[in-house]
Amino acid sequence: MLSLKISTYPQIRSFRLQDILSKCDSLQTIVVDVREPTLSHQIQWAFEGKLRELVITGRNLAIIVPDAFQGLNNANDLIVRITNTSVKHLPDSLLQYLADIRYITIDLSGNLLRTVSPSVFFTNIDDYRHSWKTWQSRQLLGGIILENNPLVCDCNLLWISQWMREVFTEMKSINVEAAIHAKSKLSLSRCERPICSIDSQPVVSPNITASVSIIDLRDEDLCHQQHCKQEARIMWPSSSSWFRNVNNFVLSVAITMIIAIN
């Protein structure tokens, strides 16, 4: 069995997919319809190392606890989709248990997110400006997809925008066509910014906004009272074998995104 769609069962106390999927060691894609309001223990330790795509969905779902992905670090390349839920906020260090996975694509489309903090993707928020110089700089090469959320342009999204542009500058040097296809998908992720008044204060009327593609977000798109100091800077390894691996991954990401667009 390569793919599976399954629901959680709120009626069963302490329900765990691990108990059901312990023998499914060939599973590559799973869609989990979460019926509870909170994702906590349900998928912990549930999947073997061949998993390539994990989809978490369900409109009842509103809260994801920080250790929800504990025990899911056996995969090599992984697409994580948290999509079409009622989640408004993601916890800090959500990816802390996925640190051993080589490359990750994060799809957060179709939720109720108004912002996404960089701390979601870091194990040590106190040092997040430097964390991108370690594993996170290369692990998230698949990108962060944020389309169809009620996002409001802010410093958090500006930081992510800067990081996205750095990543795709490097991706273009590896495989131009694949990088262009991937960027076309990421460009669908947009945020709403208020129109600034003459004194640089935001106009609070909900009807006076402009939509901006997050990957194209710039400091001037924010009202000037927001002083965004974070800068995304990535140090890339020089190993030729690493770049060959990235080339293969970039191609797979582009194919995945093209399928998603269609």
Image (cartoon, grey):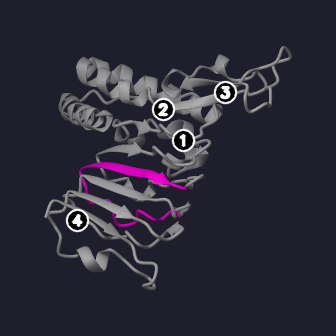
Query: Residue at coordinates 38% horizontally, 53% vertically from top-left?
Result: 99
The answer for how far apart the CA atoms under marks 2 and 3 are is: 13 Å
| Residue stretch rendered in magenta on the structure | 65-86
Q: Earlier in the sequence, mark 4 or mark 2?
A: 4
The three-letter code of the residue at mark 2 reads: Ser
- Mark 3 Cα shell of 10 Å, populated few (<14), some (14-19), many (≥20): many
Asked which secondary structure carries label 3, the reply is strand
- The quarter of the picture where the C terminus appears is top left
- The type of residue carrying mark 1 is Asn
Of the two numbered discs 4 and 1 on the same chain, state the one appearing first in sequence.
Answer: 4
Q: Which residue is mark 4?
A: 48
Task: Report which quarter residue 172 is drawn in.
Answer: top left
Residue with the mark numbered 3: 193
Residue 73 at x, y percent in the picture: 32, 59
Q: Amino acid at mark 3?
A: Arg
- Residue assigned mark 2: 189
Q: Position of residue 242 (x, y in %)?
A: 22, 33
Res 88 visible: yes
The N terminus lies in quadrant: bottom left
